[in-house]
Amino acid sequence: MTLRGLDITRAGSTGVYLEAGSKDNVVEDRTIAFNGYKEVKPEGQPFVINGVEFRYQSTGREGIAVDGSRNNIIRRNAQHWERWYGADDNLIENNVITTGPTGIWVGSRMAENTFPMDCSDPTYVTNPSVALDEAANNVIRGNALGYLSYGIRVEDDGTRVEGNTFASGVGPALAVVVGTKYRTTELDRPVEGTVLTANTANLPTNSAPFRWIWEHASTTESANTANGAPSVLIEGTRPPINPFIFAIRIWTP
């Protein structure tokens, strides 16, 4: 399926959702903006645990979500089913991505508590509820990212991050963060085989915007710069993990 030259704006949930079991799609030359706001309500969304009602305030959803969908091409854009494979072998190229906490997140559920979501993958940590969110061997190339707290987060193996630009971050912005918590600590499987090459960061608040967390393995780096100077991957502060995925806060009414 090719989706080309369309404007996707103000969808209550995800703007474009590539569902589990899909592959070989092209999403290009589109404007994707102001989506994913429907569940972000001050009064929260209700759910029940052991007969007790709780509410959560949602973070909102993504402009584009690649959920167990592989071999897709996503380029030149601006702004529970069984999963037979991960979100693998995708090309994310020449997009303009601005404004928000995270621009591109590889394996976004890898270290997040997915309870009470209905995810088909088995959990290997039960408290919190954590499963392997597979998203291997993706290429993220030639994108322009700005006004983000985290430009690109990498939590699965074989990711190639090449020729991207990062500018005008929010607060202590980071360009690239490599690493994942529970897979590293519980399974001794740190993020492996990341390639970082020819990325350019111009973030006045951070002269070292390329960071690793929770260990990493077999990472290759070359020709990355920050504010005009050569820059390498160094250990960073670990981003917060939400108590539940897509939740800003949890409370009882």
Image (cartoon, grey):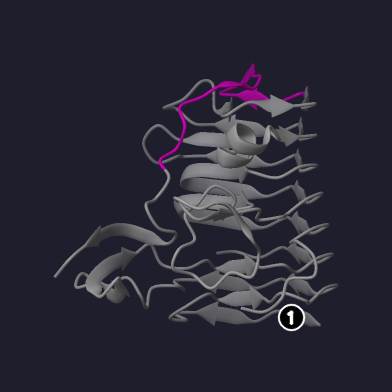
Predominant secondary structure in magenta?
A: loop
Quarter-wise, where is residue 231 in the image? Answer: top right
**Picture coordinates of residue 78, whole percent (x, y):** 60, 64
**Picture coordinates of residue 109, whole percent (x, y):** 56, 55
Q: Residue at the location (73% across, 54% down)?
A: 135
| Crowdedness near tag 1: few (<14), some (14–19) or many (≥20) residues, C-alpha within 10 Å | few
**Residue 170 versus residue 93 in the image, above or below:** above
Q: Residue at the location (77% across, 27% down)?
A: 219
Which of 51/165 is in front?
A: 51
Is residue 227 highlighted in magenta?
A: yes
Q: Which residue is mark 1?
A: 3
Query: For this view, does 99 lie left or right of residue 70?
Result: left
* Residue 49 seen anywhere in this rendered image of the structure: yes
Query: Which of the image's four quarters has the N terminus?
Result: bottom right
Query: For this view, does 88 lie left or right of residue 60?
Result: right
Q: Which residues are magenta?
A: 222-240
* Residue 177 seen anywhere in this rendered image of the structure: no
Q: Secondary structure at mark 1?
A: strand
Quarter-wise, where is residue 53 in the image? Answer: bottom left
Query: Which of the image's four quarters has the C terminus?
Result: bottom left
**Picture coordinates of residue 164, whole percent (x, y):** 69, 42
**Residue 84 versus residue 191 in the image, above or below:** below
Q: Residue at the location (76% across, 31% down)?
A: 198
Q: Amino acid at mark 1?
A: Leu
